[in-house]
Structures are given as C-alpha cells and as structure tokens.
Amino acid sequence: MKNFSFPAALRQLFTPQILLIWGVTLWLMVFDNYALVSNLTQLYPPLGGQSGLLLSLLLFFTLITALWLLLISHGRSARWLLALVLFSSAFAGFYMQEFGIIIDTVMLDNLLQTDKKEAAGLFSWQMIYFVTALGVVPALWLLFRAPQAWFQRDSLRIRGLHIVLLLVVLVTCVWPYSAGYASFIREHKLARMYLNPGFTHYSLIKWANQHLTMPDNGALQQVAKDTQRIGHNSKHELVIMVVGETARYDRFSLNGYHKLTNPRLQQENVVSFKQVSSCGTSTGVSVPCMFSILGREQYSAKKAKHMENALDVLKQHKISVLWRDNNSDSKGVATRMAYEDFQSPALNKACDTECRDVGMLGGLDTYIQTHQDKDIMIVLHQMGNHGPEYYRRYPKAFEKFTPVCRSSDLSKCSQQEIDNAYDNAILYTDYFLSEVIQLLKKYDHSHETAMLYVADHGESLGEHGLYLHAAPYMIAPKEQTHVPAILWLGTQFEYSTQQIRPYHDYPLSHDDLFCTLLTAYELKSDTCHSHYNWLIANPEVRAELKLPPLPAPPAAPQLAAPAVVSGNQKIQTQDGPGPQVVSVKSIPNTASRRSSAAT
C-alpha cells in the first residue's frame, strides 16, 4: 500500500484511448442528442420537482453511450470507427431534431429503398451546415490530426476495470430513482428511442439480423390454394386500384375537412370509408403488407418475401395484372407481374419538374383494348404526398391554398405554409382519381368497372413535434395510421355504391384488402371467412358461402350540385388546350390525350 498512488491509478485507468472515447461520448450527448434532451425535459421539466430524475436520466444515457463505445472501439480501428460514429450520428441527430423521426428498422428499410430523387428532397443547406460542423469536421480531425498515441490498444484488464466501474456508477445512478425509471420504461418508450447513436446502432443490428440472414432459396409459398372461380358473367371485370402515398384521412374534404380538397370527387358517386387503419407507417411495410394474406399482426418482410400475394392469386386465375409505378417501386409486390416504371419521361408523358401521377393513365386505353378477352386488374402506385417537399407533388396550376412551404427544411416554414403545401398535393390527388374514374366510365358499357383508392400510410405535420412518417407502429400517432380509402363502382358491377355506402363507417384496415380483391373477381376461398360479410358482396360468392343477400339498392340519389370554388381560388390546369376551371368545367380524360409506349 505504501507504493499506491491515486493519480497513478487514475492515469492507468483513464488511458488516452479511454479519454478519447469519453470525449466522443460527451460530444455526441451535447451536440447530437437534442431530440433526446428535448423529450426528457418535456417529460420532466427542470423546475417541475423532478430535476433529480431528469439529471439521473441524462447521466444514465451518457454512461450507456460511453459503455457501448468502450465495447466496440479498440486499438487502431477506433480511429475509423469513432470517425464513422461522429459522421453518422450528425446525420441522425439532424433529422431527429428537425423532424422528430426515429431511426428504427423501418426507417433503415426506407433509407435503403430511397431513390436518388427522394434522397435529394431530404437535403438542405441547414442539414449540410449541421453535418459538416458536427460530423465531417470532427471526423476528419480524428482521422488525420489526432495523435497516434490515442489509438494504442488498452490491456483487457484496464478495459475490464473501466467497464466494471461504469456499471457500478450506472447502478448508483439508477437506484435512488428506481420507481421513476420503472415509470419511464413503461410509459415513455418513444423518448429513449431518441438516444443517438445507441438506438440507431441497436436498430442496425436488428435490421441486419432480419435481412442479412434471410434465406433466399427461391421457394414461393402458395396461399389461398383452394381459390375457385364462381359464376360466369358475360362481362369482364376492369378494376383500377390506386395505391396512395402519404395521404391523411383528415385532409380529404370528403371526410369533413374544412378546405375543399376534393372538388371533383364530390361530384362523383363515391364512398369514402372513414375508419381505415394502415398496416404500417412506411411504404416499405404498408404496400407489401396490404397485398399479403398475413395481416398486420403476423406480417414480416422475411415471411412476405417468400409468399404469394393477392396479385399472384389473381394472375393464377387468368386475370391480367399490370402494375404502374410513379413511386420508388412496388416493394416486391409486383415482382412476378407486368411492371412499368413511370418515374421516367421515357414512359410518363406528364413530366415537368417531376413526373406526375396522371401520366400513368397514358396508354391504358391500348392496354385495355388488347386484353378485352380477360378480366383486368391495374395497380397505379402514386407519388402522392411524398414529403417533405410537398410543394413539388403538384403542378403550379393546383396551388390553390397559399402561402406554401417551399423548403425541405420544414422548421423554416409556418404551420400554415406546411398545411397549404400538403393540402394542394391532396387536391392534385383528387384530380388524378377523378381522371381514373373518367377513364373507367368509357368502358362502363363493356366491363364491370371499379376504382379503389387506398393510401399506404399517413403523415405527421407537426403534431406532437413529429414530422413525416415511419414512427414505430406501437407508438405512432393516428395521423400516420388513419388513412383514406375511396370506392367508385360502375353501373355494370355486381353490386352498387348504394349497397356499400351504409357501411362507410365500419372499422376496416389494410388486412381486408386481400379478400376484397378476390371477391371482386368472383373468387372464393375458405381463407376469406371475413368478419365483414358485407365485403363479400358479389351475389354468387355470397350464395356459395350461404350468406344472406344484401338488401336491394335504393333508388340512386341525386348528386349534389358541383361545388364551386368561390372568389379568386379557381383551379386551372394546363393539361388540355388552354386553361380549364376544375369546379366549372370537366377536364377531358388525360388518358385520351396522351399515349405511351409499352415496356
């Protein structure tokens, strides 16, 4: 004991590399964890009587970050690893701070599936300044200026002692506030998901385990193998399903929104379903899930990848299936279908600053006429309201609501500007869906025609401090999970809009789509013993399942007079020769004015 020196012991315990790790930890907590600190201070205000718990939580997350970096950073490799952590954490910190997003496995899927155009929309000068100052500069300094002595490997004994010391301090930190921690863990799951880079790294490991170990033996599991065709109708079905993008239920005037965002659809005999929930909060989950037989509770990318979906079943029963995409892609749904990419002017003849959804109607007349001897299913995957640059999602002629946000950095815009830009994009979707209906009306005499619009997920526009989407489903706000769904039926279809309208307020979800598509084409399967018998509305299918017939449709009601957009807020379009006012004069069908070469 005579030779023991406390300063010497500290020098041995806090080696240059351990001190570096602590420096990086403090840098991350001070500069890249604004979202975490903001959430904690909202839950436990510093002057609200729980300042002790707040300080304990901040210390706890700091110690957890240091412990994680100690476990993964060793010797010379620490130079590169810590530089990468600084750089990536600056990116994550900016988007968590600005949009309130969480970097979980769903968000990682989104990042890997984002195309160049979508990625460009997420860049801003503020993001570049933030990442350069807090990520690039310290990472470059660490790579090229930090002393070599900082990267000498510690002995396992020293590293082990330091980890034990950290664990002791962690227990000491938590013990006095154990009741508060129990409440925090149980009730505030969202807050701890903002730990940067801790939760991001946890999500990355979880994502890699889910995807990189996924077997790829090519085997495809069959579903609904007992499916049979019922009935022999003289007319073929022609159904167009529009998969919407990032559309909120409460921003459709059909659903009571105070702004007139659906001036054209309200002139059509449509049913707007008011209680529809999504399968996920991102395109990468919701789109494959809605066409899958699994349902939200059982869905996983690993399972769905090797299972047939609803379109596979339709195709097996001689139904001609076409997927047209103006988004990133079909997320694996149309892998075995005819697929056309409308993100390029090579196919899409309605491209200006970007390729418009309405361009997907070009050339459909030719496709329908060449498949007159078959039932037809056409899926149109919209660009819709993809954010954060909502102002890019519609032509200038549809900018009815002003002023609008013209930045991908939503923090620079007022709430009114964000709302207006988003609502203008909904207005353009209204126009697009109306054009789909006009196209189908041309074939109403020769086919059983129908249009079904279902959005993949919603969008947060600042509520609860959140923006965009892809929040974990268990804590996602209703703005991200309550989606619009709209149905239009032609005069020749087996059942009428009036028979369906009474059920517009029933609770539905993406889980119901699989069986809805099968029954629409008079296909019967024991898989589809749906709780919602009204969905199985085809008379012959109902008879086969021994279900009572639906009541006869009442006399068709008189449609309300077209709503007129008052004042100077008329909507003009340039798709035809000269400007046209949507609320006064019907816009000619876009598909009849455009042609497109088939792929």
Image (spheres, helix red, strand yellow):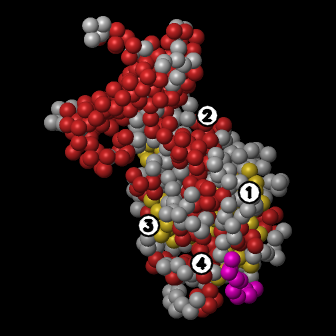
Q: CA distance from mark 2 to mark 1?
A: 35 Å
Where residue 217 is drawn, which disc sits there? 1
* SS at mark 2 in the image: helix
User: Of tags 1 and 3, which is closer to the observer?
Assistant: 1
| 412 falls in the magenta region | no
Q: Which residues are magenta?
A: 225-234
| Residue 452 drawn above or below residue 211 | below
Q: Position of residue 555 (x, y in %)?
A: 52, 86
User: Of tags 1 and 4, which is closer to the observer?
Assistant: 1
Q: CA distance from mark 1 to mark 4?
A: 26 Å
Q: Is residue 180 visible?
A: yes
Question: Which residue is found at the position 53% from the left and 63% from the top?
Answer: 298
The mark that comes first in sequence, 3 or 4, is 3
Question: In the depicted view, which residue is nearer to us: 176 or 315?
Answer: 176
Work out which residue is located at the far left of the displayed protein and give it.
49
Q: What amino acid is labelled 1 in the image?
A: Asn
Q: Main secondary structure of the magenta part?
A: loop
Residue matched to label 3: 275
